[in-house]
Image (cartoon, rainbow, N blue to C red):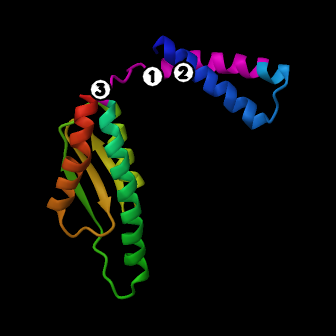
Amino acid sequence: MRRDQFVILPLFLLVLWLVLNQSWSAGQIALGAGLAIWLAWASLRLRPLGARPRRLWRLAPLFSRVLWDIVKSNAAVAKLIWRPGRDLTPGFITVPLRMRDPHGLAVLTCCLTYTPGTVVVDLKRGQSITLHVLDLQNEAAWAKLVQERYERILLEVFE
């Protein structure tokens, strides 16, 4: 953990402690500060591999894409569920990946799982990701969407 992270995490934890306890008394501040410092120190062992992202400005368009995809997918899933007589074709698809960085893969799985209608089922680091799709019509289109819309940007940031 870098020095600036060792300051930010305890401060965040202290503020969170004080907000949750709804008290700014000296005792709560002392107890919260002690817990925050201890938890920050203890968490060092939980995260042996640090992230080294580059080109962080590339995450802003990705974030907006994910938000837009969530909105579109909510509407599409609602239409699929509420329209009677429509046969769903759920299925599994395995998409080959080039990304090997665990932090980038974590962001990719979050982006895909947050989007309604898709759930990440399996991840083989540096090989592939398996998705369950609510209405799987075109496997090639889904593979292209994952590789071009999400993985390409995450490769630029994390690798």
Residue lying farthest bottom? 85
Assess disc 3: are there few (<14), some (14-19) or many (≥20) residues with their C-alpha within 10 Å of its C-alpha. Answer: some
Q: CA distance from mark 3 to mark 2?
A: 24 Å
Asked where in the image residue 87 lies, by quadrant, the reply is bottom left
The x, y position of residue 115, in whole percent, is: 38, 57
Q: CA distance from mark 3 to mark 1?
A: 19 Å
For the residues labelled 3 and 2, say whether their Cβ atoms are less than 8 Å apart. no
For the residues labelled 2 and 1, say whether their Cβ atoms are less than 8 Å apart. yes
- At label 2, which amino acid type do we have? Ser
Mark 2 = which residue? 43
Upstream in sequence: badge 3 or badge 2 = 2
On screen, 25 above or below 68? above
- At label 3, which amino acid type do we have? Arg
**One can see residue 41 in this view:** yes
Assess disc 1: are there few (<14), some (14-19) or many (≥20) residues with their C-alpha within 10 Å of its C-alpha. Answer: few
Residue 120 magenta: no
Mark 1 = which residue? 47
Q: CA distance from mark 2 to mark 1?
A: 7 Å
* Image: magenta residue range: 30-55
> Which of the two discs, 3 and 2, sits closer to the camera?
3
Mark 3 = which residue? 54
Q: Secondary structure at mark 2?
A: helix
Assess disc 2: are there few (<14), some (14-19) or many (≥20) residues with their C-alpha within 10 Å of its C-alpha. Answer: few
On screen, 6 above or below 98? above
